[in-house]
Image (cartoon, rainbow, N blue to C red):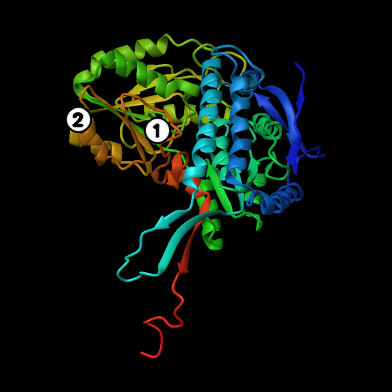
Amino acid sequence: MKIRTGRNYINGAWMTHERTFASVDPSTGRTLGTVALSREPEVDAAVTAAREAFRSWATTDVGERCRLVAAIASSLVSEYGEQLKESPLKNLITSEVGKRLPEADIEVIESSDMVSFFAVKAPDILGTRSLQLNADLWPTKRSRVVFEPIGVVAVIKPWNYPLELPLWSIAPALVAGNTVVFKPSEHSPLIGLEIARLCEQAGIPKGVVNVVTGDGETGRLLAQHPGVNKVSFTGSVGVGRRIGEDCGRRFLPHSLELGGNDAAIVLADVDVELAANGLVWGAFCNIGQVCVRPKRVLLHRSLREKLVDLIRAKTDEMRVDIDYGPMISERQRSTTASFVADAVSRGANLVAGGGAIDKEGFYYAPTVLTDVPPDAEVMREECFGPVMPVMFFDSESDAVALANASEYGLAASIWTTSTVTFERIAPQLNVGMVWMNDVNVAFPEAPWGGRKMSGIGAELSEFAILDYTRMKHVCVEASTEQRRAWWYPY
């Protein structure tokens, strides 16, 4: 296998550096490519380029900005090719982060849809808005709100959706008139550099999008750089808290998506086949490395035997390297194993899976646990791996209480045949998103974000575009009088 070489993309140029690190193929543990290990000089060069480019990009007509961003979406459609057919970009996603081809399919086409949404909708969303003032009080005043770009946006994103998560922040930042410095995860730097290639191919001017690869220290240097005007981060609570504290000290706007411990409430009237299919896919897609997967299944006690047996059977039928691939790293696999061991030690029953798979790479079997006690670590903390813990409840109020008994508040799902029941329960859940009979679906038109320790701010939708702007109220006085009635002398 040929080792790929990745270079930083700064001010429209591909830059080589002496410090490098390896991108690893999680299915083999072998080196896939080498990329720059960026430090202060590289981060500073990228931010400086973005600041310089901001002066012209911010004043570029919004229609022209959107035309260039739309070209990124068009390139993604070309890169997608055909469903379940390999392409260079999809192959890179499967090899660098271990996704299966259908999951890479979804990521590429969803990314295109999201980028296209921002390019199409931004002119209307960013248009000047006239304000209707009280004409009796202010008959001669005319007010409007304008939306101005913030400046340089630092985008720091994880590896589990290495194309989609960066682009759903980069695209709204660009159409709003900001420039970007993007730091991809150290587990997916080659895919991050593909985003730079797509921007270059689309004709995005030099310095408007810059990509620097590196590790956690690189991300820290970028987030704390004095030339950055906003930080968009998706990742762990610990890192997000540090970013939030630093931005707070500097009064910088920031958005943080910090994961979750999402509950799936399965009610007695559910279509059992539907629930089993949805929960197994939701829990184990991308081998469980998903922020909004059902990490706590709350099952009505009447369904215990029927639904658990069906979930077990469908989980046992999953095929390695076809339905699921490797985890991203040995560390991630080991952490997942510790969650399972803790739950079992506290009395949970191991129904399916429960261990590493004896083959090259970082594989772990999809795992189902039942009767998981509420003090088990997997019920309290986010398990970013293929584990489905199941608890049982007797009443609707018990289910809501269990679902809300978490420091996280990203999303939840409710599984029922009754929309009336769904509409009654959904408002009671202290989360940012609720799905009925589905899970882990994102739409560009709908905001994506959580509550509590799941972060602040929103991605996607018109609100994301506005989050990359500063509002300014402009007031014009139409009167030619030399004195206002409320001025001195009283």
Q: What element does badge 2 sit on?
A: helix
Tell me: residue 382, above or below residue 349: below
Give the total number of marks visible in the rendering. Answer: 2
Does any portion of residue 236 appear in the rendered image? Answer: no
Res. 348 in view: yes
Q: Residues within 10 Å of mark 2 (few under 14, many from 20)?
A: some
Would you call the spot at circle 1 few (<14 residues within 10 Å), some (14-19), or many (20 or more)? many
Please state, as top left, top right, bottom left or bottom right, where the N terminus lies in the image. top right
Type of amino acid at the residue the image marks with label 1: Val
Image x and y of residue 230, in percent? 57, 52
Camera-side residue of 12 and 131: 131
Of mark 1 and mark 2, the one earlier in the sequence is 1
Q: Look at the picture and state if 15 lies above or below 350.
A: below
Q: Work out which quarter of the rendered image holds the C terminus and state it.
A: bottom left
Residue 264 image offset from top left, x and y in percent: 32, 29
Q: Say which of 478 and 170 sits in front.
A: 478
Front in this rendered view, residue 64 or 34: 64
Name the foreground residue: 360 vs 285.
285
Whole-percent x, y for residue 436 in the image: 30, 27
Question: Do tag 1 and tag 2 residues touch (Cβ < 8 Å)?
Answer: no
What's the CA distance linking mark 1 and mark 2? 28 Å
Residue depicted at 42% across the width and 43% down the height? 454
- Residue beneath disc 2: 421
Does residue 481 lie above or below 473 as drawn? below
x then y, percent, for residue 249: 54, 62
Q: Residue at x 54, y 17 (%)?
A: 100
Marking on residue 378: 1
